Amino acid sequence: MQRIYRWLGLLMIIGIATACRPVGTAQVQDPKITLARVEVVAYYAWPTPIPTPTPPPAGTPTPTPAPPPPAPDLPLGLAYIFKIENPNDMTVTLDQLKFTAQLEAKKEGQSAYFAVHAPLVDEDMSIPPRTTNELRVTFFLSSRIVTTNLAVTSGHKLKEMGLTPGAVVEAWWKGIGDYAFGIRATEGTATFRTPAGERVVTFEGEFHK
């Protein structure tokens, strides 16, 4: 009888240990991140060009021309909305998400994407089992800073396309209301905390109206 009790006790210990064992990494599926849409959250219209002055009558001394006005510095607020799907039967927590925001420049059949910002989200978000959460990442661009960055990082590429940084930024600010160009999220990585440990997920997405 004592032997039977010992066997029953051993089976109970094994059962408890099995139930309390951490979930294996292979049992946890990676969450899926999808770029659902992009919204304009703040917009300032591009200024109207200054009209060319009428030339003075013949024989009139030519006045000293006024210096050209500086390039405008206009903000543009964008929101990237992601769907984050948890396919697991346990809750996972988003720890950090980052990506590169890119906009498309086009001319005469040519097209290329250029980085304009690298958003980083550090706020925790718990995603229940078999649930899809929505994450909104909002950031603001400066037309002057974007123009300068394009000139430094992509001036040669733009020149090959017959474009200038100023012309590209003007086209983006004027065309964003109609989503006249492609918008991408690239080089995306997200870190999740799960019962099986940390998981890093990569993602990309593209939005066209």
Image: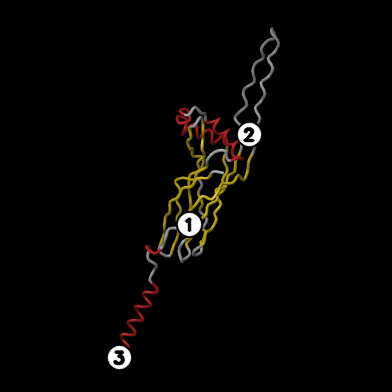
Which image quadrant is residue 170 in?
Answer: top right
Q: Which mark is residue 46?
A: 2
Give the structural element (helix, strand or loop) at label 3.
helix
Mark closer to the chain start, 3 or 2: 3
Left or right: 155, with 176 as reference point: left
Q: Which residue type does callout 1 highlight?
A: Asp
* Residue under label 1: 95
Look at 48% across and 44% down and name the residue there.
Answer: 100
Where residue 178 appears, as percent x and y from the top left, is 60, 40
Residue that protrudes farthest toward the front in the picture: 109
The type of colouring in the image is secondary structure
Which image quadrant is residue 45 in?
Answer: top right
Left or right: 45, with 195 as reference point: right
Mark closer to the chain start, 2 or 1: 2
Q: Which residue type does callout 2 highlight?
A: Trp
Please tell me whether residue 25 is drawn above or below residue 159 in the rendered image: below
Where residue 209 appears, as percent x and y from the top left, is 57, 44
* Residue under label 3: 2
Please tell me whether residue 48 is drawn above or below residue 36 in the rendered image: above
Q: Which residue type does callout 3 highlight?
A: Gln
Where residue 95 appears, as percent x and y from the top left, is 48, 57
Where residue 117 appears, as percent x and y from the top left, is 51, 42
Mark closer to the chain start, 1 or 3: 3
User: What is the distance, in whole Å, between disc 1 and disc 3 at their CAs?
Assistant: 52 Å
Q: Quadrant of the N terminus?
A: bottom left
Give the structural element (helix, strand or loop) at label 2.
loop
User: In front here: 203 or 111?
Assistant: 111
User: What is the distance, in whole Å, between disc 2 and disc 1 at their CAs?
Assistant: 38 Å
